[in-house]
């Protein structure tokens, strides 16, 4: 298997086949008049897919080890969204599986959870939060890099003020 990690805001995910395309390709499809009524990868109809069906399909991909689906499963379970019961422990397990595959968004999400703590499942750990944030930033995850800039600029969350690092 080939695993590609990319920022969520520059891709369009398709839960039908687990694939994605870049947003510029989405714009090109819209301009061409073809639109996105069918998945451009597997040709599955995208019309009228219910949230529960999307969640079910995402869970299938998560169980197969697809990192973006594991991340999504984790977030949905932690927050109790899209038909899933709130299950913080199971959600953390899914996020950790995605993070173990170096999914930058999962690393960033876990960093936030360690920074804030989850009363029922996860204690606060500034050190672990910073370690995960740095890993996500080093993988090129823009949100993590943005957070690092703020922390170095203002000297918060265990980072000393360092203007050079903030602008690096």
Image (cartoon, rainbow, N blue to C red):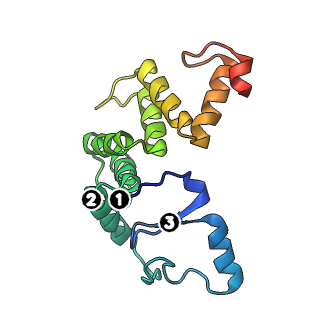
Q: Residue at x 68, y 76 (%)?
A: 28
Q: Is residue 159 left or right of residue 130?
A: right
Outermost residue toward the top?
Answer: 160
Query: As displayed, is residue 163 above or below residue 70?
Result: above
Q: Which residue is mark 3?
A: 20
| Residue 30 image label | none
**Secondary-structure class at tag 3:** strand
* Quarter in which the N terminus is drawn: bottom left
Outermost residue toward the bottom?
Answer: 33
Task: Give percent across and percent down for residue 147.
Answer: 61, 32
Q: CA distance from mark 2 to mark 3?
A: 17 Å
Task: Give percent across and percent down for residue 165.
Answer: 68, 22
Q: Quadrant of residue 18?
A: bottom left
Task: Give percent across and percent down for residue 126.
Answer: 46, 20
| Residue 64 image label | 2
Task: Give percent across and percent down for residue 64.
Answer: 27, 59
Query: As displayed, is residue 76 above or below residue 49?
Result: above
Pointers 2 and 3 in contact (C-beta within 8 Å): no
Q: Nearer the viewer, mark 1 or mark 2?
A: 1
Q: Quadrant of residue 51?
A: bottom left
Residue 79: tell me if it is visible.
yes
Residue 153: tell me if it is visible.
no
Instruction: Mark 1: give few (<14), some (14-19) or many (20+) Cα within 10 Å.
Output: few
- Which of 113/37 is in front? 37
Q: Which residue is mark 1?
A: 1
């Amino acid at each position: 298997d080939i695993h590609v990690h990319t920022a969520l805001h520059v891709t369009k995910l398709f839960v039908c086949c687990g694939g994605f395309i870049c947003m510029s390709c989405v714009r090109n499809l819209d301009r061409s008049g073809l639109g996105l009524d069918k998945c451009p990868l597997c040709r599955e109809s995208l019309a009228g897919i219910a949230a529960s069906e999307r969640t079910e399909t995402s869970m299938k991909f998560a169980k197969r080890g697809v990192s973006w689906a594991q991340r999504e499963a984790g977030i949905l379970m932690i927050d109790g969204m899209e038909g899933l019961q709130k299950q913080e422990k199971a959600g953390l397990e899914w996020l950790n599986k995605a993070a173990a595959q170096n999914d930058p968004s999962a690393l960033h999400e876990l960093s936030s959870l360690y920074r804030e703590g989850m009363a029922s499942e996860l204690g606060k750990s500034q050190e672990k939060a910073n370690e995960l944030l740095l890993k996500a930033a080093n993988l090129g995850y823009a949100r993590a890099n943005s957070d690092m800039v703020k922390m170095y600029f203002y000297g918060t969350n265990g980072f000393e003020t360092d203007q050079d690092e903030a602008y690096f």
